[in-house]
């Protein structure tokens, strides 16, 4: 007889019941508060992220309010809402967006019913910087459209409906994909999906750049007319329709969002039940016996020097080939590094110097070098007993990155110059790229030592541990700004040669960029080495939190 079939004795007192939603809200707030208490750096990063988000949201709201009364305000606002809803659907799969309270696989062993669990997760998902930013945009949207009493009434209904739809869409998609993305093969497939999303974002960006050539905002009307009847955007469109007196249309548009919300919640609930009551089939099948390595020393391993340098280079390259999250970062950087300059070049509006974007994207991979090791970093830490050991470790990791980055940068620069037919600018772009790479190697090594953070392996949706997302973004952004400042001498030299019409002397930028980038990279590694050696316990603690 199962536990569920056991009779309940009459003498057993009724257990006090507490609503699940308040518990999850308190859990979310407690995790956030405890994460901020761990270090001053986390608190600073969170506060800075919050301030920047609020400033950006305030600017968006001001811009939307200024659209009030404009003939194209409805089109712009509806399309903006549709993009925001799409972002809620796809971005949580590839960027850190929550904490462990939003991962349903952690709740499998708890005696929770689906309906209260869905409500609790839905409400707790409203807490965070992302929902706050979305709320500001939605409020600004209805402020731009609401006129008269009817418009205000529909605005009051549209704001919570839109917010609930965005969050429910995000959680439903996440729940449907959590088991797939938590598996090894599934996370590899997610790399391709992330690449598709990244390419789509770039096409949207280039389309926005050509709006002015196509007749301004009026050219968006056909797309806006379609988006008005899509869930999420239709709730905001109902405010515009009600303000114009089209009450039947407004009610229909509001009902579309309401019906979509109900369908999403139902699908989400079904997904939760299936996820929490069925075994994970992806891990049940017997694995094929592993193939033993032949032990040959040919190939790249035969070309690398013996000792720590060769070992670290091989380990770093194996991370790229085998670790799903490291592979995802590399694929995204390689794809975007080529897409941005080449699509601009094909359109005839680009510059050879946009190829430096490839160096910038790959240079970002130098940041948080120890985070990709996660808790296994303790084995690396055991081998670092001096500043020299730390320097060789960082230098080898930089060399592994440069083995791919240098030929790739050369290829992107050459192809961009060939598409544009501006070969005279190729030396300047190459020199700048090499200087930028050296600067990012330097700042990335220092940031890895001073601002390490964990990359959780048990969550498919997070690239930073709870409470460390703001620290990760601040570390990368400040590091990139510092890299641009360090590369300033080569930038100034290139600009000066163009302004003085000495483009035939641009070839000088190549050796200058190589020499300067090498020196800056070496200096950065030298600065980061003693800090790495002295902060090993702190680094190990930070990268092991996931």
Image (cartoon, helix red, strand yellow):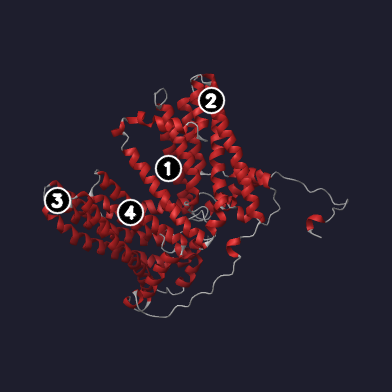
Q: Position of residue 97 (x, y in %)?
A: 51, 49
Furthest residue to the right? Answer: 10
At a point 45% along the width and 27% down the height, the residue shown is 144
At a point 11% along the width and 48% down the height, the residue shown is 501
Q: Quadrant of the N terminus?
A: bottom right
**How far, Cα to Cα, is label 3 from label 4?**
26 Å
Nearer to us in this view, 62 or 256: 256
Q: Nearer the viewer, mark 3 or mark 4?
A: 4
Point out the tag, 1 or 4, that comes first from the N-terminus: 1
**How far, Cα to Cα, is label 4 from label 2?**
44 Å
Mark 4, Cα crowd under 10 Å, few <14 / some 14-19 / many 20+, is: many
Point out the tag, 3 or 2, that comes first from the N-terminus: 2
Per the image, the residue denoted by label 3 is: 497
Quadrant hosting residue 313: bottom left
Q: Position of residue 506 (x, y in %)?
A: 15, 55
Q: Position of residue 71 (x, y in %)?
A: 39, 23
Per the image, the residue denoted by label 1 is: 52
Residue 250: image tag? 2
Point out the tag, 4 or 2, that comes first from the N-terminus: 2
At a point 47% along the width and 43% down the height, the residue shown is 87
- SS for tag 2? helix
Q: Nearer the viewer, mark 3 or mark 2?
A: 2
Per the image, the residue denoted by label 4 is: 337
Point out the tag, 3 or 1, that comes first from the N-terminus: 1
Q: Is residue 418 left or right of residue 246?
A: left
């Amino acid at each position: 007889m199962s536990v569920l079939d056991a009779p309940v004795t009459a003498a057993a007192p009724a257990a006090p019941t507490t609503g699940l939603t308040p518990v999850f809200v308190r859990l979310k707030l407690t995790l956030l508060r405890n994460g901020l208490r761990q270090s001053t750096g986390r608190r600073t990063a969170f506060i800075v992220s919050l301030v920047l988000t609020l400033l950006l949201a305030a600017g968006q709201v001001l811009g939307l309010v200024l659209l009030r009364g404009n003939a194209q305000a409805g089109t712009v606002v509806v399309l903006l809402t549709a993009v925001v809803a799409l972002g809620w659907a796809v971005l949580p799969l590839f960027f850190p967006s929550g904490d462990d309270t939003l991962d349903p696989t952690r709740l499998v062993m708890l005696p929770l019913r689906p309906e209260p669990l869905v409500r609790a997760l839905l409400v707790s998902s409203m807490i965070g910087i992302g929902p706050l930013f979305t709320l500001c945009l939605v409020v600004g949207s209805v402020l731009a459209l609401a006129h008269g009493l009817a418009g205000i009434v529909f605005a009051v209904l549209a704001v919570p409906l839109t917010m609930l739809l965005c969050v429910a869409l995000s959680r439903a998609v996440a729940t449907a994909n959590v088991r797939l993305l938590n598996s090894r093969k599934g996370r590899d497939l997610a790399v391709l999906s992330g690449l598709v999303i990244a390419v789509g974002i770039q096409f949207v960006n280039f389309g926005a750049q050509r709006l002015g050539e196509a007749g301004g905002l009026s050219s968006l009307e056909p797309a806006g007319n379609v988006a008005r009847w899509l869930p999420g955007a239709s709730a905001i469109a109902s405010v515009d329709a009600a303000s114009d007196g089209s009450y039947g249309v407004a009610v229909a548009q509001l009902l579309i969002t309401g019906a979509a919300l109900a369908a999403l919640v139902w699908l989400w609930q079904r997904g939760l039940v299936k996820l929490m009551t069925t075994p994970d089939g992806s891990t049940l099948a017997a694995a094929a016996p592993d193939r033993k390595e032949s032990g040959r020393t040919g190939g790249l391993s035969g070309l690398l020097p013996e000792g720590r340098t060769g070992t670290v280079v091989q380990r770093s390259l194996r991370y790229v080939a085998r670790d799903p999250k490291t592979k995802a970062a590399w694929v995204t950087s390689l794809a975007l590094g080529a897409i941005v300059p080449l699509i601009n070049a094909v359109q005839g509006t680009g510059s050879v110097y946009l190829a430096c974007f490839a160096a910038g994207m790959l240079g970002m991979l130098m940041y948080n070098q120890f985070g990709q090791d996660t808790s296994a970093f303790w084995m690396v830490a055991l081998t670092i007993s001096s500043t020299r050991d730390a320097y060789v470790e960082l230098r080898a990791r930089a060399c592994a990155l440069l083995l791919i980055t240098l030929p790739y940068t050369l290829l992107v620069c050459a192809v961009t110059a060939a598409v544009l037919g501006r070969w005279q600018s190729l030396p300047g772009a190459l020199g700048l790229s090499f200087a930028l790479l050296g600067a990012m190697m330097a700042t990335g090594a220092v940031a890895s030592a001073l601002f390490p953070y964990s990359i959780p392996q048990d969550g498919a949706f997070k690239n930073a541990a709870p409470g460390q997302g703001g620290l990760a973004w601040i570390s990368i952004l400040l590091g990139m700004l510092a890299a641009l400042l360090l590369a300033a001498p080569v930038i100034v030299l290139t600009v000066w040669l163009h302004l003085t019409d000495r483009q035939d002397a641009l070839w000088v930028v190549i050796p200058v960029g190589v020499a300067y980038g090498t020196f800056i990279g070496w200096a950065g590694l030298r600065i980061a080495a003693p800090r790495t050696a002295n902060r090993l316990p702190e680094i190990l603690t930070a990268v092991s939190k996931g």
